[in-house]
Amino acid sequence: MNFFIQHSELRDLYDKVVAGERLSEADALRLFESKDLNALGVIADFVRQRKAGNHASYIVNRYLNYSNYCILSCQFCSFARKRRDADGFELTVPQMVEKAREALKLGITELHIVGGLHPSLPFSYYTDMLQALKALKSGRPQGLQLKCFTAIEILHLAWLAKKSVAQTLTELKAAGLDSLTGGGAEIFQPAVRRTIAKGKESAAEYLDVHRTWHRLGQRSTCTMLYGHVESLADRVDHLRQLRALQDETHGFVGFVPLAYQPENNDIPVKNPPTGFDSLRTLAVSRIYLDNFPHLTAYWVGLGMKLAQVALSYGADDLHGTIIEEHIFHMAGATSPQLQTEADMVKAIREAGRTPVQRNTFYEPIKVLSDGQPAELAENLARSKVLEDNLATA
């Protein structure tokens, strides 16, 4: 038995996990309250190993934000702008297509697209965008998967279309939507939600959008924004509700905990997430969410060095190359705007894992055995196409 577990206060929970027993909310709260980070890591790594073996994945993707104009004013958000703001932006469909075409030259397999709740774009803008982007996949062996829209965006689009959520999702799927993003979950506890995102969708509405998408036979990811004004019990309640929906639909392919970025917003937080808290949150999530196949360490919020460590605390995925990230960086993130595929492979190997390039649904595209280089010919950071793209973003 591992040294850190043998005499740990968490020994009984380790035994429970090894026996395949489901942890209760009280068990999860004990894990969160424990200061024994080493034991937490051992338990979480046991679960990771059981689910993913020695593989750790990444995706070659690009983020695209079609606009940051938004009718909401969430207190924690540093991304949204009003029409009067000088740094607001709105991309036309041809502009989105051009950015996507440039990124496809760099080998991406996914476009990750979200935006604000735009005050005037019609529903046809979104279906036209999906159709135009999906048309770019022609001749590509891996295709191009479109992972788009948060739950609150779907509710906004349903309002625009004057249709039900199910009808709206069906039309978006027909236009080319492959997966919903998991953004917007924040924290489900109502009082916390009112404090950080007044006017946003409720927890029940967020979950129902994903439930409806899953019932259409589709898959998505989900998130939790931690390290602001929520309690540890609030985090457990959030995880409980996600686990319950996964029991019902089995539609979530991965969970992505998001570390709160405390800069440039209206929520004063005295103690933003530390490295300890981030590793603890990842570990507890991996242990408690026993019905989730994958856990992502989001390097944009964590930084790549801590994300590497997270691969020993339950995470089996480092997310993607991203290329151009706005939302976290406008909130104060100091991580790079992108990672090259070579960087992702190197980080995974340094952590002692075997790199696997995946698609949107965490399905493997290629496994990179020891010593095998990434197949991307050009380093993304040195690509003239990328430099031009970022310069005009």
Image (spheres, rainbow, N blue to C red):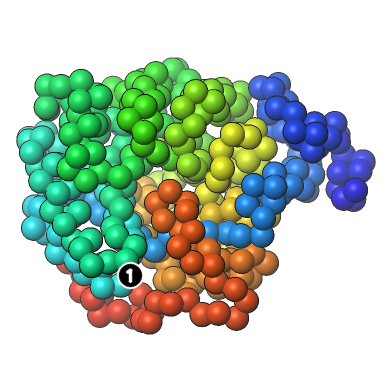
Rendering coords of residue 226 (x, y %): 51, 37
Number of residues whose C-alpha sits closer than 10 Å to that of mark 1, classed few (under 14), some (14–19) or many (20 or more): many
Q: Position of residue 170 (x, y in %)?
A: 22, 32
Residue 75 percent across, percent down from the top left: 34, 32
Percent x, y of residue 296: 52, 49
Q: Is residue 158 left or right of residue 377?
A: left
- Residue at horizontal 30%, vertical 53%? 145
**Res. 349 in view:** yes
In the rendered image of this protein, does residue 369 appear above or below residue 332? below
- The image quarter containing residue 118 is top left
**Left or right for 182, reference 15:** left
Viewer-side residue, 76 vs 258:
258
- Residue assigned mark 1: 107
Q: Secondary structure at mark 1?
A: loop
Q: Residue at x 84, y 35 (%)?
A: 15
Left or right, 12 with reference to 237: right
Q: Is residue 62 visible?
A: no
Question: In the image, what residue type sits under mark 1?
Answer: Gly
- Tell me if residue 340 comes above or below residue 22 in the rendering: below
- Residue located 75% across and 43% down the image: 43
Count the numbered circles shown. 1
Whether residue 71 sits left or right of residue 25 in the image: it is left
